[in-house]
Image: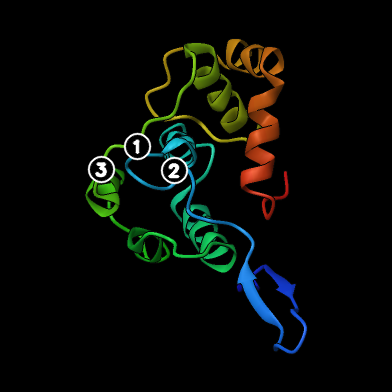
Amino acid sequence: MQYARATLQVKEVGSPILSEPLFNSEGLTDSSSERIGFVVSCVFASAINNAELRQWAQKVLGETANAPLYITELTLFTQPLFEIYNVIGFAPRWSHTEDSTLAISGIAFKRDRQPFNHPIMRDESLRKLAENPQIEKRFRSEFPFLIW
């Protein structure tokens, strides 16, 4: 699946139209890793699989100016999950609560997936998801190409 690069066109008097990607790499770097931290949490909770991670990376490349090199590498990621930190090059941080983490597992259950090594029951995960609707909203925003 290909994603078009999102652009903003600006025309100055007497100059050609310049196209710039709309998004920067905020949340994708070691010093600012909220976005990639959320995505990695989704992978580890089985809310997305490796193929969907690769789709996400393609989307990011299409919409992000100066995406970190590891995003390109994630478009090809087929290694065991524990290798993801070696590909990224750092351990991303996502500011969240334990309930938010469990809510991501609720998304996995809602998508009919069994989270790997899951600490709580399906009903409790779905309850945590219902109590934290911002997690589902963020998930749907980050992975708009997923139908579920």
| Residue under the image location 48 percent in, 41 percent down | 39
Find disc 2 in the rendering and name its residue. Answer: 36
Residue 57 percent coordinates (x, y): 48, 59
Q: Nearer the viewer, residue 42 or 13?
A: 13
Amino acid on which the number 3 mark rests in the picture: Phe
Residue 95 image point, x, y percent: 46, 23
Badge 2 element = helix
Spatial CA span between label 3 and label 1: 6 Å
> Residue tagged by mark 1?
92
CA distance for labels 3 and 2 = 11 Å
Residue neighbourhood size for the residue with mark 1, other residues' Cα within 10 Å, grouped as few (<14), some (14–19), many (≥20): many
**In this picture, is 130 found above or below 47?**
above
State if disc 2 and disc 3 touch (CB < 8 Å).
no
Q: Residue furthest front?
A: 13
Q: Which of the image's four quarters has the C terminus? A: top right
Q: Identify the amino acid type marked 2.
A: Ile
The residue shown at (73%, 74%) is 9
Decide which of tag 3 and tag 2 comes sooner along the chain. 2
The quarter holding residue 17 reads bottom right
For the residue pair 49 and 95, the one nearer the viewer reads as 95
Disc 3 + disc 1, Cβ < 8 Å? yes
Left or right of residue 65, residue 30 in this image: left
For image coordinates 59% across by 63% down, the residue present is 63
Location of mark 3 (residue): 90
Q: Quadrant of residue 139?
A: top right
